[in-house]
């Protein structure tokens, strides 16, 4: 397999990432975006970029040309041209970015529509990091008035987030005595809480959602916008030395404290959307994961779901695991559909570990169909086996749950789903979502007033688009479905999965489902191979690296785990497991660079195992680990994984 494909799912090289300095600020330029704008150790902004979204909220990709980057020690200028083209949309624009020695940034775009098209959004987006939650701020509205504000603590479903509306500028405290001001020109801007979609940011965007959309843009329409960033302080700053951004010599990871350990959640997978019957080899591989359950999702308003249910019952029986049954129910026929379904399961008698129920089409605003669904599910499904918990919630993004009043009387658990690609699709943005997953889970637990949380499923891309305003676009022949990402087969996805499992463990979820059994949304490729090998270049019958991550966790089913704490969480994820006298630590490198990692605060002996671009598909490398002065040090290859099996591990303190 091509090295790049194995590492991150594409034969193309990753975009160049250019380090920049603007006086005391340091930041990166990548694919037309400004990213990780920092003042020393303080992150000021996460990202500034231009987004073009179609009438179904699909993001239109960008093609760059005429790139001109001019860098000086304390300032820079960047010029480039962009075309956003997809279907009827053709928008072209010129970008100019300046960073000055006083710490100011100006990002300007000037463009024109070269076709007539419908859009839901076109213009700048600015991301403030989720770590600003609770931080004080001030907003300046377009009428010149100013208002004290605070970044939301609890996940906020108000759009816009009050009082971040009709914006001319936002000022927020970066550190004592230093404020950052972000000002906007060319449209009306407002803020939303992107943590609702597991993005670790607050996003300021244009145009207000209170205005009708989609909007028809006529060919020839000119659009000019700019974003300016300034530092406000009584103190002077020294120029940031970009040499400080050289890779860390050691990425420190801290050993878990006694209070950090949690039970390993019950792990499961979903039935495949491509395979009806599992082969003997596929069954053997799945059995080796020590799974708890198999998830099947049924739409009871549709005919033919009986066959899908029977196949799932047969697969769960062959795997000797229980069935998690997710039911999408249509308002108005809930009782009728559930009574018909109950007769079916009375005949099949599946072993069920949980019921998940939610509306077939969840309302984005207004309405509360969950109460009708939960009440009938409680009456009709619970008597099948009263010990089986009933979970009510959402089958899509958390914002739908946040805007619903949960029927607490008729539910045992709350259910949510997670994926890292609602708004952004690059590697770093996907890794950033790991920070937000515990926030979403905590938000669900608060809404459910402390009832257990079930996360089902976790996928690499959204399974469907719940925001469609028109006809759902059909899959273009020769292209992958929108729910499929070639990174599914990569080491990058394995590392993200490890980080996500750490978030589940840290959050104390009851049960979690990852991916599917087989296929391009699964843990391994079909025996017949990929239907589109030029787009999804997997090995026929091969396992994906993320399978191995679940295998490493599955070895400790019924045990305890702890998410470890790397001091550079965008570069490394790590967790520890223990059960019946065995202990294992697992590490994932999220970057395209080799890293040196130190696990600190431990004593004991271990064997190190590596899975990376050099040996995947073969036996993992194994070598003894040496702990010196309470520190284990080792090197990791790009996007690689290392795990340590310990003998006599304990904390050195």
Image (cartoon, rainbow, N blue to C red):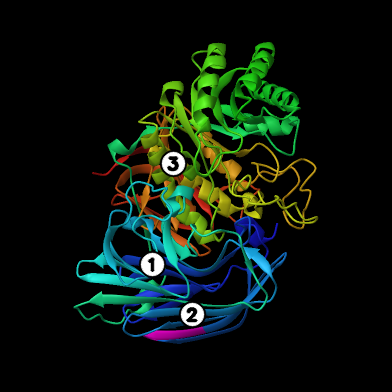
User: Residue 197, how many percent across, how many down?
Assistant: 49, 49
Determine whether 323 is above or below 346 in the image: below
Q: CA distance from mark 1 to mark 3?
A: 25 Å
124 and 333: which is toward the camera: 333
Left or right: residue 13 versus residue 497 is: right
Left or right: residue 552 versus residue 281 is: left
What residue sits 45% from the left and 54% below the top?
A: 194
Q: Which residues are magenta?
A: 73-78
Left or right: residue 480 versus residue 466 is: right
Q: Which element type, helix, strand or loop, lies under badge 3?
A: helix
What residue sits 66% from the left and 30% below the top?
A: 298
Disc number lying in front (1 or 2)? 1
Visible residue check, residue 60:
no
Left or right: residue 280 versus residue 393 is: right
User: Residue 384, how many percent across, how many down?
Assistant: 57, 12
Q: Which element type, helix, strand or loop, lies under badge 1?
A: strand
Looking at the image, is mark 1 or mark 3 earlier in the sequence?
Answer: 1
* Residue topped by disc 2: 108
Q: Which element type, helix, strand or loop, lies under badge 2?
A: strand
Q: Which numbered disc covers residue 167?
A: 1
Circle 1 packing at 10 Å, graded few (<14), some (14-19), many (20+), is many
* Residue topped by disc 3: 402
User: Residue 467, how many percent across, how many down?
Assistant: 59, 49
Looking at the image, is mark 3 or mark 2 earlier in the sequence?
Answer: 2
């Amino acid at each position: 397999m091509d090295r790049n494909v194995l590492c991150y799912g594409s034969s193309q090289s990753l975009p160049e990432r250019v380090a920049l300095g603007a006086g005391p600020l340091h930041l990166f330029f990548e694919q037309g975006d400004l990213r990780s704008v920092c003042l020393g150790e303080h992150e000021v902004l996460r990202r500034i970029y231009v987004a073009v979204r179609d009438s179904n909220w699909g993001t239109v990709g960008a093609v760059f040309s005429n790139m001109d980057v001019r860098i000086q020690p304390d300032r820079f200028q960047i010029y480039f041209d962009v075309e956003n083209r997809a279907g009827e949309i053709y928008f072209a624009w010129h970008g100019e970015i300046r960073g000055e020695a006083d710490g100011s940034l100006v990002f300007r775009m000037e463009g024109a529509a070269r076709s007539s098209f419908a859009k839901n959004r076109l213009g700048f987006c600015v991301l403030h990091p989720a770590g600003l939650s609770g931080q004080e701020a001030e907003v300046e509205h377009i009428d010149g008035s100013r208002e004290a504000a605070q970044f939301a603590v609890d996940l906020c479903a108000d759009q816009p987030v009050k009082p971040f509306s009709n914006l001319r500028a936002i000022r927020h405290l970066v550190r004592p005595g230093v404020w950052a001001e972000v000002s906007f020109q060319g449209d009306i801007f407002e803020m939303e809480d992107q943590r609702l979609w597991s993005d670790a940011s607050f996003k300021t965007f244009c145009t207000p959602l209170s205005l009708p959309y989609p909007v028809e843009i006529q060919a020839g329409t000119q659009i000019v916008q700019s974003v300016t960033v300034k530092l406000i302080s009584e103190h002077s700053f020294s120029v940031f030395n970009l040499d400080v951004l050289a890779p860390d010599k050691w990425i420190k990871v801290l050993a878990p404290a006694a209070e950090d350990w949690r039970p390993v959640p019950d792990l499961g997978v979903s039935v495949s959307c491509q395979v009806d019957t599992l082969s003997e080899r596929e069954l053997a591989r799945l059995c080796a994961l020590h799974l708890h359950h198999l998830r099947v999702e049924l739409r009871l308003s549709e005919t033919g779901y009986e066959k899908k249910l029977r196949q799932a019952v047969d697969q769960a029986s062959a795997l000797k695991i229980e069935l998690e049954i997710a039911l999408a129910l249509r308002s108005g026929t809930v009782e009728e559909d559930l009574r018909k379904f109950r007769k079916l399961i009375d005949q099949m008698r599946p072993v069920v570990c949980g019921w998940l129920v939610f509306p077939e089409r969840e309302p984005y605003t207004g309405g509360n169909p969950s109460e009708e669904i939960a009440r009938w599910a409680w009456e009709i499904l619970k008597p099948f086996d009263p010990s089986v918990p009933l979970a009510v919630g959402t089958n899509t993004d958390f914002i739908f749950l946040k805007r619903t009043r949960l029927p607490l009387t008729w539910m045992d658990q709350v259910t949510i789903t997670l994926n890292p690609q609602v708004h952004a699709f690059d590697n770093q943005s996907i890794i950033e979502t790991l920070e937000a997953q515990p926030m979403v889970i905590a938000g669900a637990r608060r809404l459910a007033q402390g009832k257990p949380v079930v996360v089902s499923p976790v996928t690499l891309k959204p399974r469907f688009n719940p925001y469609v305003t028109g006809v759902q676009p059909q899959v273009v022949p020769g292209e992958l479905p929108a729910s499929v990402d070639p990174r599914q087969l990569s080491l990058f996805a394995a590392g993200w999965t490890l980080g996500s499992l750490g978030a589940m463990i840290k959050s104390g979820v009851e049960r979690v489902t990852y991916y599917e059994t087989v296929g391009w949304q699964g843990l391994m490729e079909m025996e017949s191979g990929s239907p589109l090998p030029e787009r999804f270049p997997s090995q026929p019958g091969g396992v994906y690296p993320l399978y191995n991550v679940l295998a490493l966790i599955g070895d400790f089913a019924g045990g305890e785990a702890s998410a470890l704490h790397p001091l550079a969480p965008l570069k490394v994820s790590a967790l520890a497991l223990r059960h019946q006298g065995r202990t294992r630590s697992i590490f994932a490198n999220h970057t395209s660079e080799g890293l040196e990692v130190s696990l600190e605060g431990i004593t004991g002996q271990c064997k190190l195992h590596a899975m990376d671009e050099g040996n995947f598909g073969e036996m993992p490398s194994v070598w003894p680990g040496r702990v010196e002065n309470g520190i284990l040090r080792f090197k990791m290859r790009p996007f690689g994984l290392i795990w340590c099996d310990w003998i006599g591990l304990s904390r050195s303190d």
